[in-house]
Image (tube, rainbow, N blue to C red):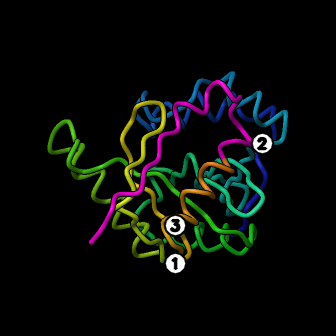
Amino acid sequence: MMIRKIEINELEDLYNNKILKDFKEDEIPPLFSLVNHFNDGSMEGYFYVEDNINLGYAISILGDKSNIIALFAIDKAHRSKGLGTKFIEDLKNYYNKILIVEVEKPSLAYDKDDLSLRERRIDFYKRNGFILYDNIDYSIFEIDMFLMVSDDLSNKEVESLVIKTYQNVLKPHLMKYVKIHIEDTL
């Protein structure tokens, strides 16, 4: 298996046939936004491929020291086979940077199915070495999230990386929608 860069001419098909099915509407940016960010180099994506079959995909926001994995999915027909773990490991090795993921808070789930999905996502990233920073109050475009990071960092380092990475992709007037606050711990 290998990773292969998603070309801009593949993005619309991926969006319409996979992303819209793999994620809830409030979890995904509009297609035009992804296209713009792919074109300006602030985002990129990779397929996870075996025998010319795309088994999964990841789309990342690129930063100098870290990348935020904005979308990550393995095709439903290929889940529970360890491919997600292998793909994450390949991305860690390829990027050789700190990887950050945003996961929705289980306490804010809409129903049992949504709760299960949120818990499975957190468990998946924990199994793959990501650390849950549940003492950082974080939201993006008014969606409360937890941050999970591939490296053991201080809360201040996580805060700085998230802000700097989003500054690469968001226009200054949109940065007000990235809210991050470190809760005091005694």
Residue ID for mark 2: 42
Question: Which one is nearer the viewer's eye here, 31 or 37?
Answer: 37
Above or below: residue 149 compared with residue 141: below
Residue ID for mark 1: 152
Q: Residue at x 73, y 51 (%)?
A: 62
For marks 2 and 1, give the CA distance: 25 Å
**Amino acid beneath label 2:** Ser
Question: Which quadrant, please, contains the C terminus?
Answer: bottom left
Within-10-Å neighbours for mark 1: few <14, some 14–19, many 20+: some
For marks 3 and 1, give the CA distance: 7 Å
Q: Which mark is residue 35?
A: none
Residues at circles 2 and 3 in contact by the CB criterion of under 8 Å:
no
Question: Which one is nearer the viewer's eye here, 69 or 183?
Answer: 183
Question: Which one is nearer the viewer's eye here, 171 or 184?
Answer: 184
Residue 152 place in picture, x, y as percent: 52, 78
**Amino acid beneath label 3:** Val
For marks 2 and 3, give the CA distance: 20 Å
Q: Give the SS element for disc 1.
A: loop
Q: Residue at x 43, y 27 (%)?
A: 25
User: Start and end of the magenta stretch?
Assistant: 166-186
Is residue 120 shown in magenta? no
Residue ID for mark 3: 149
Return the disc, 2 or 1, that comes first in the chain's sequence: 2
